[in-house]
């Protein structure tokens, strides 16, 4: 599914790759992805202490759950990311570029004091609009 981005000249885009408004095509299926962390398929934390490795695992996990729902990362319209240290933003953003390009999903980045496991550095949730399923 394709995203259409609109940016107003009345709001300064703070960083490259920032989408103010993302319009989702329709008809489609709304997919709400819960906050996912850097766990492998066995439930073990991946990349303890390494924000790049953890970010990559989080996005691989989002890809996997979307594919299980017959969606893809291309269907993602919005992501929300929670990280323990806002100074890690450049590393997080560099990994995002491995998974997305323009037009970017709408995004929110929030520094938090803690996640559900002290070894986790990042958690991300997503909203996607996947194509309607074919009627059998």
Image (cartoon, grey):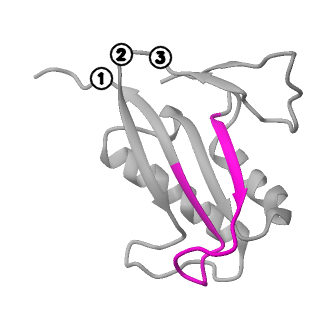
- Please rate how many residues cluster around mark 3, counting C-alpha atoms within 10 Å: few if below 14, some from 14 to 19, many from 20: some
Q: Is residue 116 left or right of residue 103?
A: left
Q: Secondary structure at mark 3?
A: loop
Q: Which residue is mark 1?
A: 132
Q: Is residue 76 left or right of residue 121?
A: left
Looking at the rendering, the stretch of residues picked out in magenta corresponds to 105-125
* Residue 94 at x, y percent in the picture: 78, 53
- Please rate how many residues cluster around mark 2, counting C-alpha atoms within 10 Å: few if below 14, some from 14 to 19, many from 20: few
* Residue 20 at x, y percent in the picture: 72, 27
Q: Secondary structure at mark 2?
A: loop
Quadrant of the drawing holding the C terminus: top left
Q: Report, in whole angstroms, how far the alpha carbon at label 2 lies from the one at label 3.
A: 6 Å
- Residue 27: mark: 2
Mark 2–mark 3 CB contact (< 8 Å): no
Q: Residue placed at 64% from the left, 60% from the top? A: 82
Q: Which residue is mark 3?
A: 25
């Amino acid at each position: 599914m394709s995203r259409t981005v609109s940016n107003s000249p009345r709001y300064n885009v703070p960083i490259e790759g920032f989408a103010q408004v993302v319009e989702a095509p329709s008809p489609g299926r709304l997919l709400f992805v819960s906050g996912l962390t850097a766990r492998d398929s066995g439930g073990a934390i991946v990349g303890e202490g390494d924000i790049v490795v953890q970010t990559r695992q989080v996005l691989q996990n989002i890809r996997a759950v979307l594919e299980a729902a017959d969606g893809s990362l291309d269907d993602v319209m919005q992501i929300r990311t929670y990280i323990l240290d806002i100074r890690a933003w450049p590393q997080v953003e560099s990994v995002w570029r491995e998974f997305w390009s323009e037009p970017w999903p709408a995004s929110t980045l929030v520094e938090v004091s803690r996640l559900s496991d002290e070894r986790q550095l990042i958690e991300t949730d997503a909203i996607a609009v996947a194509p309607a399923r074919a009627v059998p």
